[in-house]
Image (tube, rainbow, N blue to C red):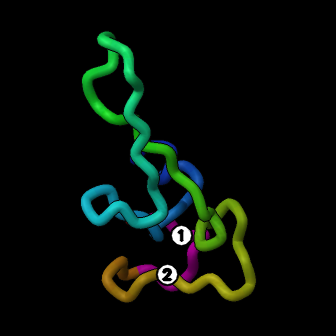
Amino acid sequence: MALFQYMIGNGDYSIAGRHNIKLIKLFDIKYLYPIPIPYDFDYSGLVNAYYAIPGETLGIEKVTQRFL
């Protein structure tokens, strides 16, 4: 999921804080861990919304740039 977020240039998510992510738990014995489902991609570089600004801690100027 983090690779997907990197590929679309999304810095507006948090796994630990569950920001823009839902965790889905399947009631099946094969799946022990919850599955993260990302949503709300308006601050991603792929969408490139006119109002999107990157977070101050990322150190980038535009959402279309990648943070390494």
Q: Is residue 29 above or below residue 61?
A: above
Secondary-structure class at tag 2: loop
Does residue 49 appear to the left or right of 3 in the view shown? Answer: right
Residue 54's label in the rendered image is 2
Residue with the mark numbered 1: 65
Counting from the top left corner in percent of width and height, residue 14 is at 35, 63
Q: Nearer the viewer, mark 1 or mark 2?
A: 2
Residue 42's label in the rendered image is none
Residue extent of the magenta highlight: 60-66
Q: Main secondary structure of the magenta part?
A: loop
Q: Is residue 4 above or below residue 55?
A: above
The answer to whether any part of residue 68 appears in the image is: no
- CA–CA distance in space, label 1 to label 2: 9 Å
| Residues under numbered marks 1 and 2 in contact, where contact means CB atoms less than 8 Å apart | yes
State which tag comes first along the sequence, 1 or 2: 2
68 vs 2, nearest the viewer: 2
